[in-house]
Image: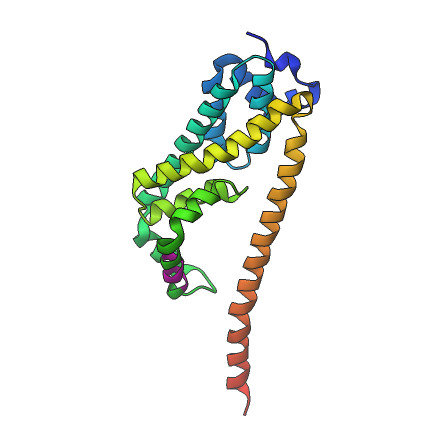
Amino acid sequence: MNSLLLALPQEPADGVAGWAADLVDTLGGPGAGLAIALENLFPPLPSEVILPLTGFAAGQGVISPASAIFWTTLGSVAGAAALYWIGMLFGRERMHALWARLPLVRSSDLERTEAWFARHGTKAVLFGRMVPVFRSLISVPAGLERMPLPTFLGLTAVGSLAWNSALVMAGYWLGDQWDAVETYVGLLSKAVLILALAALALYVVVRVRPSNGRAQHRRTP
């Protein structure tokens, strides 16, 4: 078997890429699957590094492209299933109790969110697997709302297959330039995070402003 670590530039070989390359070198396809399963559980491990690197490994003959896609998709489903069970075990009652202690929120907000997920949860799980940042987080509300497990696993598998195939094959075709994928997907991740933070800031402003307005109105003689 060819060594993936020897094919990597020295600098990335010392970081996440080196860790993932060592797993693939040692375990082959299952190593890539394990890396992606951990990426689901610990989002700071970037799929935009691990998946293109796995594609690069396929281009180097360390594993086959089909094996790379199969094992990384299996790892995605395994990691998502763990988060689903965490959400299910935490439960709606605990979530409502925790929500009631949070500032600037009302129980009706959570109820509307639950109603939205009941209507659109299948699309959220399917397409959420292809959105940076949210691809891991979407598994928790699916567990909280007890989406049927076969449905969740099927949607997760299809969404993960699309995302993983795109990034693995990008790394396969780019060869030594596989790390360029991280740059572009990283920009997308930052854009998604900025939009989420902007939405959160807008939510806080909308919640605080009416409260301040009512307080000022009560003080007016």
Q: Is residue 12 left or right of residue 129?
A: right
Residue drawn at the location 34% of the way across and 39% of the way down: 85
Q: How is the image coloured?
A: rainbow
Q: Give the x, y percent position of residue 2.
A: 58, 8
Farthest residue to the bottom: give it: 221
Q: Is residue 78 left or right of residue 54?
A: left
Q: Is residue 116 left or right of residue 4?
A: left
The quarter of the rendered structure image containing the N terminus is top right
Residue drawn at the location 51% of the way across and 68% of the way down: 207
Viewer-nearest residue: 118 or 141? 118
Q: Quadrant of residue 76?
A: top left
Please say whether residue 41 is visible from this viewpoint. no
Q: Give the x, y percent position of residue 11.
A: 70, 22
Q: From what the image shows, is residue 197 above or below residue 23?
A: below
Farthest residue to the top: give it: 1
Q: Quadrant of residue 98?
A: bottom left
Q: How many marks?
A: 0
| Prevailing secondary structure of the magenta residues | helix
Q: Give the x, y percent position of residue 157.
A: 41, 34
Q: Report the span colored magenta.
A: 109-114
Please say whether residue 195 is visible from this viewpoint. yes
The quarter of the rendered structure image containing the C terminus is bottom right
